[in-house]
Amino acid sequence: MNKIHVTTTLNGDPAEFLCEPQETLLDILRDTLGLTGAKEGCGSGDCGACSVMLDGRLVCSCLVLAAEAQGRTIETIEGMADGEKLHPLQQKFLDHAALQCGICTPGILVAAKSLLERNPDPTETEVRYWLAGNLCRCTGYDKIINAVMDAAAQMRGA
Amino acid sequence: MALDSEKRVFKVVGTRPQRPDGIDKVTGRALYGADLSAPGMLVGRLLRSPHAHARIRSIDSSAALALSGVKAIVTSDDFNSASNSFNQDVLDNCMARGTALYHGHTVAAVAASSKTVALQALKLIKVDYEILPHVTDIADAMVADAPVVQDGRGAQDAPAGTSANVTDVVAFGHGDLEAGFAKADKIVERTFRTAATHQGYIEPHACLATMGPDGKADLWCCTQGQYAVRAFCADMLGMEVSQLRVTASEIGGGFGGKTTVFIEPIALALSRKSGRPVKIVMDRDEVFKGSGPTVSSLTDVKIGMTKDGRITAAHAMLRYSGGAFPCGTIEFGAMSAFAAYDLEAVQTEGINVMTNRPREAAYRAPGAPMAIYAVESVVDELCQELGLDPLDVRLKNAAHAGTKSSYGPTFNEIGLVATLEAAKAHPHYSAPLGVNQGRGLSCGFWFNFGGNTCVSLNLNADGTVGITEGNPDIGGSRAAISQMAAEELGIGYDKIRTVIADTNSLGYNDVTDGSRVTFAVGLATIQAARDAIQKMCSRVAKLWDIDEDAVVWEDGYAKPAGANAGEFEPMSIAEIAAIANNTGGPIAGHYEVNADGAGVSFGVHLVDLEVDPETGFTTVLRYTVFQDAGKAVHPSYVEGQMQGGSVQGIGWALNEEYIYGEDGLLQNPGFLDYRVPVASDLPPIEAVILEIPNPGHPYGVRGVGETSIVPPLAALTNAVSRAIGKRMYELPMSPPKILKAIKG
């Protein structure tokens, strides 16, 4: 099978890979590039655990073909902290105990960051609807919502 | 192990420090089941039955084996007979032996050089099936002429006129039912149904197995218990336990569903046959079809009550279906049904019924939610009928210290009355309700468990401490264990690192189940710390040349016990660690125990909701959880258990269900059609922690993980019933069912 050569920008750095036509961006991130922070919870776009940013747009990487990433910019959970310094959302998730098992956490953090970039001052309802595409089975969402609201407040003040 | 007699002021326990594994989990670094790879690794995939029930006449894998890149194919022939019938059932569920018992039952597996090749190979495996009659509904499966799921498994003492699918007959209770019902002013008897639901963990089952030609094997997997995985797999593959080392990955949710094995023995068999590492990761579709949902149920409850709200007699007949195998979960249901009540006459009977569905796996308080749902619904109906306040009635009948429980033992100090009183005093209970709105409440209960536990605590040269424990951290337990060690040693939480051992690095530990980890591992950690403290005091006594008894441990320092002991400068843990090699060698504390005294757990939930009379759609408006934690070690994670269990229960009550067609096939094996609650479905979940110390733990800790899934089923049912003015008797209360009730 002929593989496709793809050149991208990944978390700010140039990255290239070879992929089969049917491989998803999630497959390549996890199995070829070794970035296992994005998780496969369903493979059908229903759980949001594989959320990444593609050219500034929030996507389920299980629904994006890897070949579609040609020439585009990908941001994953691995690029969220600035070196040793956590993003305010990451820190607030720790402060609020907003994760239990943590498998949904990378996807939720990526999705929440995308929300706050668009809307720095969301209502609780807006946060709940924005994150409705990210399933969490452990927390009941309560502490996640509180962490996002608190991070938004801090980022507005910063 | 008893509660410390001296009432202590906690310094670390009860605070909310950052969890030790937190940074890894917010940065994507934490490694879960599917995140590890090995050089030369093959991809394992499973072939699953397209039929609900079919005899396997033959399996021809020749064409698949001939495909380039295919390295091994295994079937049931590649496994040993298990050493006991329970393990044999687990094995037969992993890989069908002779007969596919449900839609999605694994019949063969392949290991290949890539996922693409593996999927091609599955299509080339030819299975000759003889289709057999099937039954997926519990009521249908009980009738005398029902298709029999497995021959020879029926109970000898099954009720007369039932089919050979009936297994696991149980009964509990005490007192004179007839006399009790004769004293009642009102008797209500109803029948309830609950659908099977799935644990719904976001991480599909995943493992990586490596077995060398010398028979030594390593297995990495997401599990709630690496020792249980080792025991199952070694038995199924005919290995000595010592030859298999199992390492638990970080676990992406389990809720009981990862206390058994599904793919792990298959990956090992494929690795043994191919001589290469093999990784298997389930698809979500496979998780629904081939891993454990909970039981479905059909329950009759009859309760008699006096006009002033005293329960005079109570009876329940529970029928659970744990899928295609016998299933003991019915016993927990029958034991827990009336646990919240102090009753003179009570009886519960239960049976399990086999159906052509996946084998049940534990799901958070397994067996309790559906039993207590039925009981709490009837209690609420009686309260409505008699015009009584449902909280007052529960207070009037509540189990308390000294109550002979409905399942036998007499309760010691329990927190039910305190949680009921907290609920009554909370503003939620008296808040006004609007049109089409209803308020419901329910009690909940779980036994809790202690079990086999082993902890090692090592003092490092710089005075920091390493703790090795054997239970996967499913929701913050490393934090709680580090806190208890810090509390006992009198050192900072940040001076301790708690890690979870592989099966070769620490003695046996039971699985992470029964809400046992913070209780039992915590207890063992405290004892291991006391063991280390005793050794440290002994070293210091030698150094000071005084009696060991003359040295005490306070706030991280060894000190002379009093003026008579002599004048010595207190020695810190770091100072003692620094001279350990010169005073007798390394210092470590250990503790091994089969812990009892777990202390039962009670909770009460309040819910307000609104039903749209046009559509039957329910919106949850307000939710408050009251639960006894004994002592909340890390209150945030205790709240998290209370909130998370509540939301799973809300999903169970309103929407989640396994849907089978007439053809016996599962119709909704995905998160689109099996819809779990999302953030926008829910209000904030307020968690109110009560602390009634457990007499069986030094700090009073009780398990908190499971009780919270129990009350939502009845709390929502009672709220919907009150909102629409019609009683509801079936879960889930999806909009069409509510609409039908409104119009009917």
Image (tube, rainbow, N blue to C red):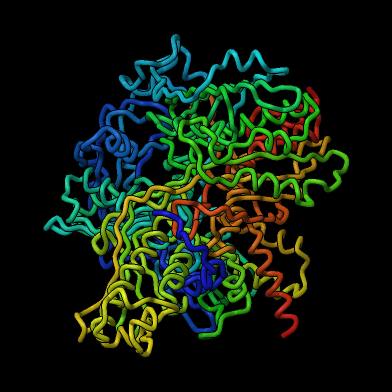
Eyeballing the image, is B484 above or below B125?
A: below
In the image shown, does B317 or B137 lie closer to the viewer? B317
Query: Which residue is rendered at x = 53% and y = 46% of the image?
Result: B413
Query: Which residue is rendered at x = 47% and y = 20% of the image?
Result: B141
Question: Farthest front residue?
Answer: B564
Q: Is residue B532 left or right of residue A158?
A: left
Residue B356 image position (x, y, % from top left): 43, 28
Eyeballing the image, is B717 above or below A143?
A: above
Residue B349 image position (x, y, % from top left): 49, 22
Q: Is residue A61 visible?
A: no
Query: Which residue is rendered at x = 23% and y = 54% of the image?
Result: B271
The quadrant holding residue B396 is top right
Eyeballing the image, is B511 above or below A52?
A: above
The quadrant holding residue B398 is top right
Residue A45 image position (x, y, % from top left): 57, 56
Q: Quadrant of the C terminus of chain B?
A: top right
